[in-house]
Amino acid sequence: MKKEDKSAIIEQIGKTLNEYGHFYLADTADLNAAETSQLRKDCYKADIKLLVVKNTLLEKAFDKSEVDFSQLYSVLKGQTSLMLCNTGNAPAILIQEFSKKSKKKKPALKAAYVEEIFYIGENHLGELVNIKSKNELIADIVAMLQSPAKNVISALQSGGNTIHGVLQTLAEK
C-alpha cells in the first residue's frame, strides 16, 4: 500500500472517530463469512458502524487525535474491529447477545471508549451493557422530578371527587 493511501485511510479513520461519541474495539477473528455478515446486519440495525481496521493505521489515527488514546495501544493485537456508535451501551449489548449465539464466543471485547472513559478487557462487558446514555439519564431525572407533582395532583383530584360526591349526596337529601 502506498504512503498516500495509508495517509488517506488514517485521515478517514480519524474523521470517523470524531463523528461518533463512543467506540469499541472488538476481536472478530475466527468468525466465518456467514457470521461476519450477520454481525454486520445486526450492527446496521442497531445503528452501529463496523469497520475492520489495521492496528497500525488505527494507532496512527489515535496519535493524530486530540484525545490521548495511548491506553488502548496494548490491545491493538490480532484482528481488530472498530464499532462506532452514539449510544454508549449499544455495541456492548450487541457483543453480548451475538457472542452468546456464537459457538466461538466472538466478537470479544478488547476495549471501549465510552462517556470519555476507557474500559480495557472483556471483564468490563457487563458494566458497559448497564451504562445508561445521556438521554436515558435525563429521562430518569425528569421522571423522578415529575413523580411528586403527579402524586400531589392525583391526591387533589381524588379529594375533589370525594368532596363533590359528599356535597351531591347532601343536596339530594
Image (tube, rainbow, N blue to C red):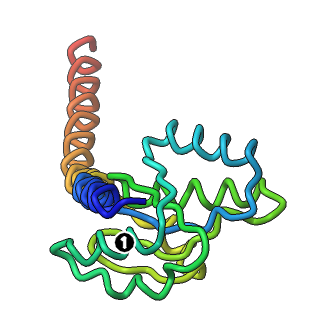
Residue 145, by quadrant, is bottom left
Q: Residues within 10 Å of mark 1 (few under 14, many from 20)?
A: some
- Mark 1 lies on a secondary structure that is strand
> In screen coordinates, is 145 left or right of 98?
left
> In screen coordinates, is 44 left or right of 135?
right
Residue 167 horizontal/vertical position (percent): 21, 23
Residue drawn 40% across the image and 82% down it: 72
Q: Please, which residue is most extreme toward the top here?
A: 172
Front-most of residues 152 and 16: 16
> In screen coordinates, is 100 left or right of 9?
right
Amino acid type of the residue that numbered disc 1 sits on in the rendered structure: Tyr
The residue at which mark 1 appears reads as: 113
Residue 54 visible: yes
Residue 144 visible: no
Quadrant placement of the C terminus: top left
Residue drawn 32% across the image and 54% down it: 136
Q: Please, which residue is most extreme toward the left here?
A: 66
Quadrant placement of the N terminus: bottom left
Residue 153, by quadrant, is top left
Q: Please, which residue is most extreme toward the right here?
A: 103
Residue drawn 67% across the image and 41% down it: 38
> In screen coordinates, is 150 left or right of 112?
left
Residue 54 horizontal/vertical position (percent): 48, 66
77 vs 115: above or below: below
157 vs 134: above or below: above
